[in-house]
Amino acid sequence: MTAEPLVLVPGLMCDETVWRHQVAVLGATRDIRVADHAQSDTLGAMAERILDQAPARFALAGHSMGGRVALEVVARAPERVSRLALLDTGYEALAQGEAGDREKAGRYRLLEIARRDGMLTMASDWARGMVHPARLTDMRLMDAIHSMIARAGVATFDAQIRALLARPDRTGLLATLNMPTLVLCGREDNWSPLARHENMARLIKGSLLVSVPDCGHMSTMERPEAITAAILGWLES
């Protein structure tokens, strides 16, 4: 029996680097494609790019913003997605009031740093809150994250910020999912916390919740072996 194709969806300012370990291990036995968002400025446009380029039916995994894009793919074409993995992500729209204003201000602060001081300066500021504190001195990891973010460029950062701030609420979609679903989170993810993933898992019937210890938001790069093992178990479930 031929293994089903797998589409991996990177998050904000990420590319195939964020999925490197998963592609190297899982790509030995199946067709794996990593989505490229180009300069799409809505999550829906990112989802449409995936659907235009993906096989007729495929497994789908998204990390961070990529998890939100994966939900947009399922909202548009649930019959094409055989199984779903949501990693370090979310499902709600921008909060109303002060909380939403804080998020918007924080994102645009980073964009201003990128424009004024360059992408590497912005990346070093942003990434400090994206990994487990113990990994901040792991320069191989941090350099890989900084370089990946810097490669994307200011125009892509601007477009993706606008996409995230205009994100739809997909709470209602979660209860309708009818496919093997993995919900995974770094246990110390402060950007997209474990409690949010526990809520997602409760809303998605039959889903599997996995929390990865000693791991922040950039789980696929921080704990690649653990994440690849979880994904393999999901693919074989």
Image: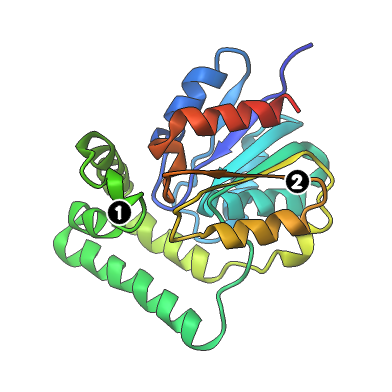
Residue pushed farthest bottom?
97
Residue at 29% from the left image edge and 66% from the top image edge: 110
Q: Which residue is mark 2?
A: 207
Residue pushed farthest left?
117
Q: Earlier in the sequence, mark 1 or mark 2?
A: 1
Neighbour tally class for label 1: few under 14, some 14-19, many 20 plus, Cα within 10 Å: some
Nearest the camera: 142 or 46? 142
- Measured as percent of width and height from the top left, residue 94 is found at 55, 74
Neighbour tally class for label 2: few under 14, some 14-19, many 20 plus, Cα within 10 Å: some
Q: Which residue is mark 1?
A: 127
- Measured as percent of width and height from the top left, residue 51 is found at 67, 41
Nearest the camera: 212 or 81? 212
Residue 90 appears in the picture as rendered = no
- Callout 2 secondary element: loop
Q: Is residue 184 above or below residue 124?
A: above
- Callout 1 secondary element: helix
The mark closer to the camera, 1 or 2, is 2
Whether residue 71 sits left or right of residue 159 in the image: it is right
Given the image, on which type of amino acid does mark 2 rest?
Ser
- Measured as percent of width and height from the top left, residue 11 is found at 47, 49
Residue at 64% from the left image edge and 48% from the top image edge: 70
Residue at 29% from the left image edge and 46% from the top image edge: 134
